[in-house]
Amino acid sequence: MINKFIQLIISKIISNPNHSKFEYLEPKGDPGLFGPNSLTWIVHKDFISMMIGGISSLILQSLHPRAMAGIWDHSTFRTDINGRLARTAEFIARTTYGPLEMADKTIEKIKKIHEVVKGNDQFGNSYYANDPYLLNWVHMTESICFLNANQLFTDNKFNFNQKNQYYSEMSLIAKKFGINEPVETENDINKQLDKYQKDLIFTDRSQVVMELIMNFPCHFTIKPIYKAFSQAAIINLPDWAFSFLPIKKPSFIKRKIIINSVKTISVPVRNALKEGIAFQAKKRMNIV
């Protein structure tokens, strides 16, 4: 079962014909946007926690009707949620571990795609994917969920200053997307959440996202593994999110069970991906 899950991961991400890990070997000495001494390289190295964080962030993004409208109208997530997560993973890999030219081209490509992502949400409010306000919501939710997942499902334990360092580093990507005041500290997040929460609502579209996440379309042999990661995505949500969701905050005992289960499942997956993209980027920097 585990081997089949690993094969699925590799087929979706590592073996993507448009995305080879060997792209990350050149040019020698190019640190990209962050470099090997960054917290971002540490956080984004763990595929398991990043996948869980990506699922959690999609739940949070679905609570903002205008952000959700862009996904609903211009994405294939309802028929290919695995593909949606794979594309997010590819974006993160290229902007985190790619040389500077790759990172910048990837961002410019997404900005160009966003140019045509516009319309009206289900309440008649207009949206535009390159709107800095909506981009900031997406960026903030991803940063929160990636860092939370890394702290829950790996052995990394960051202090307050290290967490702020991660948010500050991630703001580099936000600024390249035209976000003028991205979150750079936990204090920034708390302030901006107050601004965004007035816009948040759980809609029928949010329900579709939740159902897709809790019932991942996959082969029955790996369904228990996907179920564990879906549950992990729920416990990875920040506490404030449960005031908007039709589910209760998981108990302490349930959280511990899920965390331990995911850590156990993750061991062979992490071993299989030891020489993945992060490793290739380190070779580019001549540090392995």
Image (cartoon, rainbow, N blue to C red):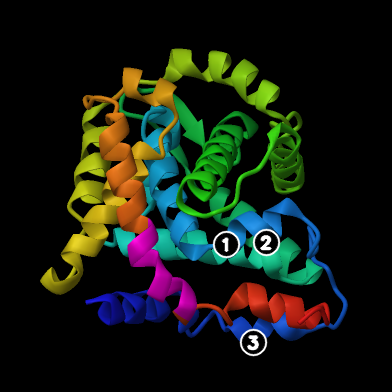
For the residues labelled 1 and 2, say whether their Cβ atoms are less than 8 Å apart: yes
- Residue 95: mark: 2
What residue sits right under mark 3 in the picture? 22
What residue sits right under mark 1 in the picture? 91
Q: Quadrant of the N terminus?
A: bottom left
Element under label 2? Answer: helix
Q: Is residue 267 magenta?
A: yes
**Considering only order in the chain, which callout, 1 or 3, is on the residue closer to the N terminus?**
3
Q: Which residues are magenta?
A: 263-271
Image position, residue 274 (x, y; %): 55, 78
Instruction: Give me the residue at 57% from left, 79% from top.
Output: 276
Image position, residue 45 (x, y; %): 60, 64
Q: In this view, which residue lies farthest toward the left?
A: 220
Alpha carbon separation for disc pair 1 and 2? 6 Å
Q: Residues within 10 Å of mark 2 (few under 14, many from 20)?
A: many
Quarter of image, res 203 = top left
Element under label 1? Answer: helix
Alpha carbon separation for disc pair 2 and 3? 15 Å
Residue type, mark 1 in image: Phe
In this image, 39 relative to 200: left or right? right
**Considering only order in the chain, which callout, 3 or 2, is on the residue closer to the N terminus?**
3
